[in-house]
Image: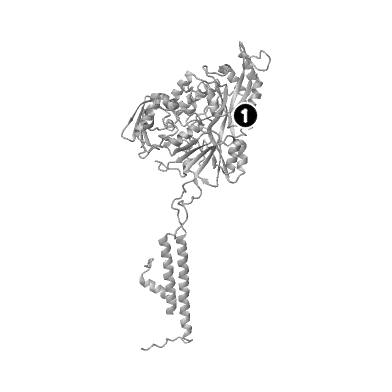
C-alpha cells in the first residue's frame, strides 16, 4: 500500500521525523505512529467516511397507504360518474394535457409545453414522448386527437363543454397536437386540466350508447395508478405504476377502505387500521383527533359546498309546487344558514350563497342580494302567491288544488349523519311557514336512483366540489346537463347563453361581470339552497408515512393528486435502500486501535533496550565474527 504524500516532499518528511528527537528509537516510534495515522486517513478517504454518509436513495420506497372514506365511487366510467370519488378515480387512472399545481394554477402535464397563436384561435401542444397506457401501448398525439373528437362528435356531456368550440384537431408527427377553435376561448387552460386522455385502441369502436353504458371495470389509462381490484362497499385497491412516464409514486399501493359511518371511520384512524382520512373528518371529531399525538389534523379552504337540490324539472316527478320560484324563495328565507354553520358544522364552514365557491375568491360574487332569514317575509310571500292553509291543519295547499299540500321529503346522505340535524332544524323553521318536511337518510346510490333518469325526488341534501376555474361550477345548471351534472332539472336559455359568453371572453374583468350575473340568476331562482361553504378537514397518522400534501381541496381530491405521489414511508422497509452501512466506520476504528498498539509497542521496546545496557549512555561493544 502506498502512503499518500499530502503535499510534503521526502526531505521535509525526514526533517519532520527528526524534529525534537535525539534518540534513534524515539524517532522510529514517532515515524511508526505517523505511518499508521496516514494509513488510517488513507483508509477513511478511500472508504468515503471523511464526510457524512449519504443514503443511496434519500426517500424510502414501498409500503401500502390505507385510506378511509365514507363513500366509494359510483362508477369507473369517466363519462358517467357524478360523484367526487368517481372524479378522483378518473384522475388516478387517466392523465390530462395540463394539471392544477399546488397553488391552483394550470401547469404542464402530458403537454410539456404549449403555444397560442396571436389571434388566440390555435393552440399547439407538444406532449411527452415516453408516456404509455397501462396495457403497454404508447400514448401518442393521435390519442389526444381521438379523445377530443369523440367527445365533441358524440356530444358526451361530461366533457362536451370543454371541447365544443374546437373546429379542428390535427397532429404533426406522433407528439404534437394542434387545436383550432372557432372563437377565442378564455378557459382553455382550465379545460385541459379536466379532460382525460383516452386510448384510441380501447374506445374507438364504441357507440355513444355503449360508452354511456360501459362499466369500465378495467380502466386503461396513462396515469400514475392502475386498478388492482374493487370490492363494492368494501375497498378499492390501486397499484402504483412504477414505470410511470412522470415521477412515479414512492408507495406500492393505496387501499381505499369503505366505512358505513363516521364513528367507525374515526376509530379506524385512531386504532391504526388506516393511515389517512383525506377530507371527510366531521367537525365534531376534530378536537378528539387533535388530542392524539400520533395523528395530525389538517384544515384548508375547499372548493366545496353543501346544498339542497330542489327538483325543478317540469317533466319529472316529485311535488310540482317546487317548480314555483316563489315557493323556493320562501324556503330560502326560512333557512338560517349561520345557525346551521354553528350548530352542525361547529364553525368549520361559512354560510353559503351562490353556486361559485367562496374559495374561488376572484369569481365569487360577495354582493348577491341574500334572502335574509325572515319567517315573516317567507309567510307573506307564500300568502301573496296563493298558498293558504285552507283546512287549518298547519300545512299550506296549492292555489286551486286543496289536495296538493306543501309537503316534501328531504333525502340526507347517510355518510353525513350530522346533517340529519340540518334536516331537523329545517323541519322546525319550515313548519312555521306552513311546510311539512319529512327527513329521510339514504346512501348515494339510493339518492341517485331517485334523481336519474326520472327526477322523482322532492329535494336532497348533497355536496358539490368545483374546480379553481368557475366554469365547471357554472356548468351544472346548463340545460344540456339535465340528466347528468344538473341534478335539479332547472334550466334557462339566457343562462345557457351567458355560459358560452363567459367561456369565450378572454378579459378576466369582463368575464367576471358575466359570471356575477349567472350567480345572481341562480341564487334568485333558487334551484339550489347553498347552505354552507365547507372547509377541507382531514387527518393522518404520523407514525408510518410522511410527505402528505395539504392544499386547497384537502389532502387528496380530484385536484390534489400530489399526496398519493409524494407520500412515503418514514423508514425503509426490509430490503429498502436507505439502511446505513457501518462497515467503513468499523474498519477505521480497528485501524486506529492497531495504530495505537503499534506506537505503544515501539515506544516500549525503545525504553526497554536502553535500561538493559545500564546507566551509562555509551554504545555497546561491537560483536566480532
Which residue lies at the image location 61% right of the left edge and 26% below the top edge?
440
Q: Position of residue 258 (x, y in %)?
A: 54, 36
Vertical side of 170 occupied by 330: above or below: above
Observer able to see residue 505: no
The extreme left residue here reads 173
Q: Is residue 409 left or right of residue 560?
A: right
Instruction: Name the residue carrying label 1.
Output: 420
x 45%, y 58%: residue: 51
Q: Residue 443 appears in which quarter of the rendering?
A: top right
State the scheme by which the image is colored. Answer: one colour
Residue 34 lies left or right of residue 519; in this view the side is left
The quadrant in which residue 450 appears is top right
Binning the other alpha carbons within 10 Å of mark 1 as few (below 14), some (14 to 19) or many (20 upward) gives many
Horizontal arrangement in the rendering, residue 250 relative to residue 377 (left or right): left
169 or 133: nearer the eye?
133
> Which residue is found at the position 47% from the left and 84% from the top?
612
Position of 386 compared to 172: left or right? Answer: right
Secondary structure at badge 1 equals: helix
Amino acid at each position: 500500500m502506498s502512503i499518500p504524500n499530502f503535499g510534503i516532499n521526502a526531505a521535509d518528511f525526514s526533517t519532520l521525523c527528526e524534529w525534537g528527537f535525539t534518540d534513534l528509537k524515539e524517532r522510529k516510534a514517532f515515524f511508526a505512529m505517523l505511518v499508521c495515522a496516514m494509513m488510517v486517513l488513507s483508509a477513511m478517504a478511500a472508504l468515503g467516511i471523511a464526510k457524512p454518509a449519504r443514503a443511496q436513495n434519500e426517500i424510502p420506497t414501498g409500503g401500502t397507504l390505507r385510506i378511509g372514506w365514507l363513500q366509494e365511487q359510483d362508477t369507473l366510467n369517466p363519462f358517467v360518474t357524478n360523484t367526487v370519488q368517481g372524479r378522483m378515480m378518473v384522475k388516478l387512472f387517466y392523465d390530462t394535457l395540463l394539471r392544477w399545481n399546488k397553488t391552483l394554477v394550470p401547469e404542464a402535464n402530458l403537454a410539456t409545453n404549449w403555444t397560442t397563436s396571436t389571434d388566440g384561435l390555435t393552440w399547439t401542444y407538444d406532449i411527452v414522448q415516453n408516456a404509455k397506457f397501462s396495457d403497454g401501448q404508447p400514448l401518442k398525439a393521435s390519442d389526444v386527437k381521438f379523445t377530443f373528437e369523440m367527445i365533441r362528435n358524440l356530444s358526451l356531456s361530461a366533457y362536451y363543454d370543454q371541447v365544443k368550440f374546437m373546429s379542428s384537431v390535427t397532429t404533426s408527427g406522433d407528439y404534437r397536437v394542434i387545436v383550432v377553435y372557432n372563437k377565442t376561448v378564455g378557459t382553455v387552460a382550465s379545460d385541459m386540466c379536466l379532460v382525460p386522455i383516452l386510448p384510441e385502441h380501447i374506445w374507438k369502436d364504441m357507440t355513444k350508447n355503449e360508452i354511456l353504458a360501459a362499466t369500465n371495470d378495467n380502466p386503461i389509462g396513462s396515469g400514475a395508478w392502475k386498478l388492482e381490484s374493487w370490492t363494492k362497499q368494501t375497498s378499492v385497491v390501486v397499484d402504483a405504476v412504477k414505470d410511470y412516464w412522470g415521477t412515479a409514486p414512492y408507495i406500492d399501493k393505496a387501499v381505499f377502505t369503505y366505512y358505513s359511518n363516521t364513528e367507525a371511520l374515526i376509530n379506524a384512524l385512531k386504532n391504526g387500521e388506516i393511515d389517512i382520512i383525506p377530507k371527510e373528518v366531521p367537525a365534531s371529531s376534530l378536537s378528539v383527533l387533535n388530542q392524539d399525538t400520533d395523528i395530525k389534523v389538517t384544515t384548508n379552504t375547499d372548493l366545496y359546498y353543501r346544498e339542497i337540490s330542489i327538483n325543478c324539472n317540469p317533466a319529472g316527478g316529485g311535488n310540482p309546487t317546487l317548480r314555483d320560484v316563489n315557493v323556493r324563495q320562501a324556503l330560502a328565507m326560512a333557512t338560517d344558514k349561520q345557525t346551521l354553520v354553528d350548530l352542525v358544522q361547529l364553525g368549520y364552514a361559512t354560510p353559503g350563497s351562490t353556486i361559485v365557491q367562496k374559495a374561488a375568491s376572484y369569481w365569487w360574487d360577495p354582493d348577491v342580494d341574500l334572502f335574509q332569514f325572515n319567517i315573516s317575509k317567507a309567510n307573506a310571500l307564500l300568502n301573496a302567491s296563493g298558498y293558504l292553509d285552507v283546512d287549518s291543519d298547519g300545512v299550506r295547499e296549492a292555489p286551486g288544488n286543496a289536495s296538493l299540500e306543501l309537503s316534501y321529503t328531504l333525502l340526507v346522505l347517510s355518510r353525513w349523519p350530522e346533517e340529519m340535524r340540518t334536516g331537523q332544524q329545517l323541519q322546525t323553521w319550515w313548519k312555521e311557514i306552513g311546510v311539512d318536511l319529512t327527513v329521510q337518510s339514504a346512501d348515494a346510490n339510493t339518492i341517485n336512483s331517485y334523481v336519474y333518469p326520472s327526477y322523482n325526488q322532492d329535494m336532497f341534501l348533497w355536496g358539490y366540489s368545483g374546480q379553481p376555474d368557475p366554469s365547471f361550477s357554472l356548468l351544472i345548471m346548463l340545460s344540456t346537463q339535465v340528466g347528468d351534472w344538473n341534478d335539479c332539472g332547472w334550466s334557462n336559455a339566457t343562462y345557457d347563453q351567458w355560459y358560452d359568453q363567459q367561456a369565450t371572453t378572454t378579459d378576466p374583468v369582463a368575464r367576471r361581470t358575466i359570471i356575477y350575473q349567472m350567480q345572481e340568476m341562480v341564487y334568485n331562482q333558487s334551484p339550489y339552497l347553498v347552505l354552507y361553504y365547507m372547509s377541507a378537514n382531514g387527518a393522518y397518522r404520523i407514525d408510518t408515512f410522511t410527505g402528505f400534501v395539504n392544499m386547497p381541496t384537502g389532502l387528496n381530491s380530484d385536484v390534489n393528486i400530489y399526496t398519493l405521489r409524494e407520500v412515503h414511508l418514514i423508514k425503509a422497509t426490509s430490503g429498502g435502500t436507505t439502511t446505513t452501512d457501518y462497515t467503513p466506520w468499523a474498519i477505521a476504528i480497528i485501524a486506529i486501535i492497531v495504530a495505537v498498539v503499534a506506537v505503544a509497542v515501539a515506544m516500549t521496546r525503545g525504553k526497554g533496550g536502553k535500561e538493559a545496557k545500564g546507566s551509562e549512555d555509551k554504545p555497546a561493544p561491537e560483536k566480532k565474527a
